[in-house]
Image (spheres, rainbow, N blue to C red):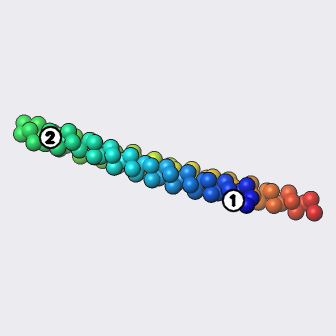
């Protein structure tokens, strides 16, 4: 197996790990935050405010973890392109030696 193929495999593995890790942490984050919101939403004087804060919180959490996943995919695509360039340059260099 060539070094480039190994690097491609490592890149794919890392990209998947970050993607799955971010999703797992997001689920834990939401579940942990839900507990106090559930309690606060049952206290009549502050329930409307708690619901509003929860909406903002949940939207922010969704946006942040989605941004992490999108940046991760962008980094993966950039690395794939970089490996393509390196591989082509290596092939061109080998062809020149012949």
Q: Which residue is drawn at 62% across and 53% down?
A: 10
Q: Which residue was labeled with disc 2?
A: 39
Q: Which quadrant of the figure contains the N terminus?
A: bottom right
Tag of residue 5: 1
- Most extreme residue toward the left is 44
Q: Using the rendered view, name the quadrant where residue 51 is placed.
A: top left
Left or right of 11? Residue 95 is right
| Percent position of residue 95, x then y | 88, 63
| Percent position of residue 23, x then y | 40, 51
- Pointer 2 or 1: first along the chain: 1
Q: Residue at x 85, y 57 (%)?
A: 93
| Percent position of residue 6, x then y | 68, 56
- Most extreme residue toward the right is 98
The one of 47 and 42 positioned closer to us in this rendering: 42
Q: Using the rendered view, name the quadrant where residue 56 is placed.
A: top left
Residue 81 visible in the shown view = no
Q: Residues within 10 Å of mark 1 (few under 14, many from 20)?
A: few
What kind of element bears circle 2? Answer: helix
Question: How far separated are the C-alphas under marks 2 and 1?
Answer: 52 Å
Q: Which residue is drawn at 92% across and 59% down?
A: 97
| Percent position of residue 5, x then y | 69, 59
What kind of element bears circle 1? Answer: helix
Left or right of 10? Residue 42 is left
Q: Do the residues labelled 2 and 1 touch (CB within 8 Å)?
A: no
Number of marks present in the image shown: 2
Q: Which quadrant of the figure contains the C terminus?
A: bottom right
Q: How crowded is mark 2: few (under 14 residues within 10 Å), some or many (20 or more)?
A: few
């Amino acid at each position: 197996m060539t070094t480039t193929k190994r690097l491609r495999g490592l890149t794919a593995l890392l990209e998947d790990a970050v993607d799955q890790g971010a999703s797992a942490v997001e689920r834990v984050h939401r579940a942990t935050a839900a507990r106090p919101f559930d309690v606060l939403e049952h206290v009549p004087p502050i329930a409307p405010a708690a619901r509003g804060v929860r909406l903002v919180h949940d939207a922010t959490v969704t946006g942040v973890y989605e941004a992490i996943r999108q940046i991760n995919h962008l980094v993966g695509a950039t690395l794939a392109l970089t490996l393509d360039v390196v591989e082509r340059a290596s092939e061109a260099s080998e062809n020149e030696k012949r």
